Amino acid sequence: MRQHILLIEDEPNIVEAITFILLRDGWQVDAHSDGATAMVAIRDTKPDAIILDVMLPNKSGFDILGELRADPKTSDLPVMILTARGQTKDRERAMDLGADAFMTKPFSNSEVLEGIHALVGHK
Amino acid sequence: MAQQNLSGTRVRERRVQKGLKQAELAQAVGISPSYLNLIEHNRRRIAGKLLVDIAQVLGIEPELLSQGADARLLMDLRDAAAAMDTASANVQRAEELAGKFPGWARVISGQHRKIDELDRRVAGLMDRFARDPFLFETLHEILSTVTGIRSAASLLAEPDDLNEVWRKRFSDNLASDSQRLSQAGTALSKYLEQDIEKQAAGFSPQEEFNQALVDHGFAFPEIETGTHSVETILEDAFGRLSPSAKIIALAYLKRYLEDAKKLPFETLANLVGNHGPSPAILSKYAKVPSATLLRRLVALPLDSQGIDVGLVTCDGTGTTLIRGLPVGFIAPRPQSACFDWPLYTAMRQPFTAIEREITLDVLPWAPQVPQQSRGFVAFAWCETVGQAGFDTPAQYESTMVVVRQRHG
């Protein structure tokens, strides 16, 4: 059975590119663009891993990550954070909140793929 | 003693500059050439009448040999060593370095000060980047569109594996993201251009004068010794300023002269030498108005123990008039102040002395300041200036000095 990735990102062109390369690589992919309803989407789709953008409408990726880690049902879910802010303090904040990987925009397609393999592979 | 050691080096430098032989200087001041040789090699101390006599023959003020002249240099060398985490190995040898290689020491000092200035600018820019919503949004937009372009271009560049439907989608994405990037870049360029014009137009005479004052340093020994008039110094130090800025500079120099008459340099230097730089303590001995005492402290040359003094003043509206901060004291923005400074506390409590310690290590914008240099004490005093009357309301001026505390 194909492993399932939930991509939470509000930039449609980035969603399209990442979705394509993950599908081509054999993953099942769902995408969601709104921060406020992201937790509902996570509970509904039960993904094997999440790619989570920080700057989302209505709720930030950091807030969503915090909620994920606070809920026993999702506390172990692998999460890769995407952000345009590559500052050390953002990376530290993501790691403090329990992110498993951190990727700064602009990233390459191969970096995303390698990141997901590493993330789901070692879990 | 360290300070005296440097005096010997300075005697030698001045003598060579004047083209005097050791024997000639020794004879002129009534000592043997061998004794002068020991002095010049920092093996004998000079003080009192001998110091005055040597200074007279060399044509300089005795203070230039006895104190102050190289104190800033020494402090910079210590700071430079501390900043590079090599303090334990090298800081004790700063005086030796300054004595043996004064030219190289000045290069290190100059570079250290330049780094300090750049740190201030970087801190200001970092702060601006973090707080300016337009910059933040636009850079986020640029990075997002670049990410989309990079992904789409990479997929389109692959020779196979992309059917026509996906090929068309990514081509469309590439076109739309390129357009977004172009718009974001144009908006950013326009914003920065307007900002530069705004800054150029907004450089007030007061800011112009303040920058020149900081560049010159806050001390005007020629006024204090009476060797130059206020008008001469005005042309020497501030001649290139706009007419409006020169009017401000003239008023500043006149007040400097008045302050110097109330508290002459020698008296001030002796008091600080005996009691330290704290205005709270000095005010018990210096019988001058509090604001005068604070303003006079910045005219004092640095001592070699790591004391540095900065001055900030503002008018009753809170507008900054003078702003010169000690090295290492990084304010949140290059031209602004912090609402929490004692300068403003004093404004709310005129004629009340305010003293408070300030530690920079709690400030996120000051990561580059060496840990040893983060302790400061600020003293502030606010009083009325000018003559108030029935038709002239009282005008207030607040003055704050920031003293960098001694460190190991």
Image (cartoon, coloured by chain):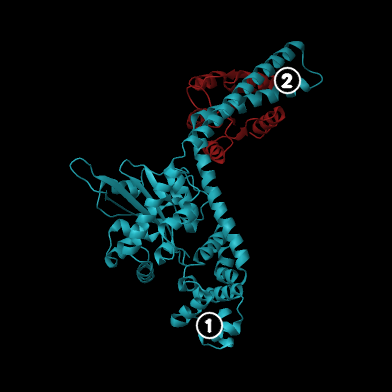
Number of numbered discs present? 2
Question: Chain A rendered in what hue?
Answer: red
Residue type (three-letter) at the residue carrying disc 2: Arg
- Please give the residue where the numbered disc 1 appears in the rendered image: B44
At horizontal 56% and vertical 27% (from top left) the residue drawn is B190
- Choose between B63 and B136: the one closer to the eye: B63
Q: Residue furthest left?
A: B390
Quarter of the rendering containing residue B110: bottom right
Question: Chain B rendered in what hue?
Answer: cyan
Q: Residues within 10 Å of mark 1 (few under 14, many from 20)?
A: some
Residue type (three-letter) at the residue carrying disc 1: Arg
Q: Residues within 10 Å of mark 2 (few under 14, many from 20)?
A: few
Q: Secondary structure at mark 1?
A: loop
Can you tell which mark lies on residue A24?
2
Can you tell which mark lies on residue B349?
none
Q: Is residue B33 above or below residue B198?
A: below
Q: Is residue A113 above or below residue B15?
A: above
